[in-house]
Amino acid sequence: MDKESDLPPPIFKTWGRFYAVVIANTLVTYLLLVLFSAYAR
Amino acid sequence: MLHPIDWLVVVLYFAFIVFVGYRTGRGNKGIEDFFLARRSMPWYAIGLSVMATQASAITLVGTTGQGYVDGMRFIQVYLGMPLAIVILCVTLVPFFYRAKVFTAYEFLEKRFDGKTRSLTSFLFLMGRGLADAVVIYAPSVILAIVFGIDEKVIIIAIGLGATIYTTLGGMRAVMWVEMWQMLIIFLGILFCLGSVIVGLPDGVSLTDAIQIAGATGRAETMDFNLDPTVTYTFWTGICGGIFLMLSYFGTDQSQVQRYLTARSLKESRLALLFSALVKIPMQFVILLTGALLFVFYQFEKPPVVFNPVALERLAQARDVSQLEADYDEAFEIRKEAAQNFADALGGTREDEMRRSFLQADAVFSGVRSEVLGLIRESEPGFSDTNYVFPTFVLTKLPVGIVGLILVAIFAAAMSTVESELTSLSTATVVDFYQRYVRREAEDSHFLAVSRVATLFWGGFATFCALYMGRLGSAIEAVNRIGSNFYGPILGVFVLAIGARRANGHGAFAGVLLGIVAVQLTARYSEISYLYYNLVGTVVSVVLGYIISLVFASPERSV
């Protein structure tokens, strides 16, 4: 397999950073859901 | 009952889908073309296709209904999905991609043996074969009742429509069609949300509506209750949901096949991560639409039961005029209480108005429950949850938009059906025909066999859907059992990539014992169904590993 083709988008440099961004985004989503629940209660 | 313009929108949709399927599906020369689009797909098409596969018509119709009846807590099912996708991108996806397999189960023969591959593939065929019929039948019944279209016409349009272009165009056609179908679904969802918000009465803003829904608990999206028997909580979503999503995205051929079509491993990962990022917000919008529908129907009188046929049957069987009068009165009282509550929001009388609104809502719900109870005397288990959204679409939305939403429901149903068809035919041809009947032949031979297999599964699903009314309970039972296979199958993949000493005997026995464990858990415990995959995975890994050690023999390792 072509090594080049497995590089992440340049902005993230490594897949690890990309995954970290996805996980951070997920945690922010959880927080937003908690805030939504609290607001609507 | 549908306006000619709405019919025109539906006809244009079918013409467009056939056109895209025909344009993109030409030139299949072998099964790598037919089943994997020659591993040439870009990430955005795969990502949307992955989402379209997961979003069935019942997802669209049932989830909005769920938001209306039960609120937004259902979103917690998806909390584990992004984390599961990251785990898969690190573990199984590279293994599948580098092994250059056609099916997830083929990988198990490379790692273990033929019997483990055949067992897991067979379980997939059993589980998914009949599920496809349910995917066609369930929305057809609802659309038939609400829109007044013949049920058989809808079943044939969805079933045979999807079968024809899947058989002719193969995976490439299916994935490009699915990409468009998912965009139509997105558009439909946004139109619905917009329509509900626009439909709120003057003086009730979106934030007021959220507060009204929230007062009844319908805007609760996070529940940190630790009780494992509560179905939807943060913990079931994280602990059970991760295993559910790992099983679905990591071992279900209908999903694995999508990212095997990528032109590189990077595209596979990007596609999955894209769908992981979009899924929770999308489900939020669908559920919010349902919760806001509840608010909409505070000010517009909803039918006492959203399934008009069931209500008519009840009215013929007994006199319900008193109940209807009670219902009308309870609605007027609740409407006034809701308006007072909306007016009082942020003021000194908010708590008082909230209490009187909740009291009025309880009386209103009580009358409705009484009617539902009478229907359940002759139809046990009756629920009108899935009829809420289509009823709103037909009775409250303008001409043209009704057609668009109907098309979005068709797109959701067909995208799931065609994904199932490609995965079922791939497993049939690659895991059984090529493995046991004919290993070597011309490309044209395998291509022809693949088309026959697709046609067979499409015909089978459509036939079962047409006769679902008679076969219903049997098919549902098999379907329910089928959904319990995923956890144990995930366990085998965990053994495959995580336990060097695991062997074929252990993996094979692990799956079977995992299935038994899930069945026993479902039967004798009260825990949320979201934990079943966790139980199945743990049992199949632990027992599979122990049995591997007992029957230790030199095995290939990855």
Image (tube, grey):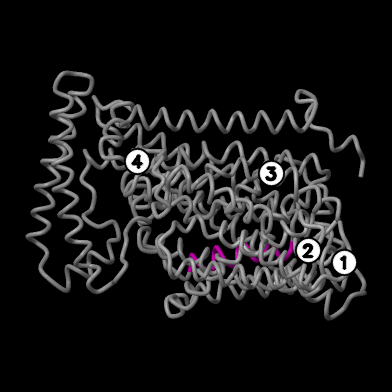
The correct choice, above or below, for B315 with respect to A15 in the image is below
Determine which residue is flagged by label 4: B291
Q: Which mark is residue B87?
A: 3
Q: Looking at the image, tell me whether mark 3 or mark 2 is earlier in sequence order.
A: 3
Q: Under tag 2, what secondary structure? A: loop
**Element under disc 4:** helix
Q: Which mark is residue B555?
A: 1
Rendered position, B131 above or below B351 = below
Up-down relation of residue B269 to residue B375 (above or below): above
In the image, the segment drawn in magenta is B153-168
Alpha-carbon span between mark 4 and mark 2:
48 Å
Residue at x-position 46% and y-position 43%: B75
- Callout 1, which amino acid? Glu
Q: x%, y% of residue B93?
A: 76, 49
The subunit carrying tag 2 is B
Does residue B215 appear to the left or right of B257 in the view shown?
left
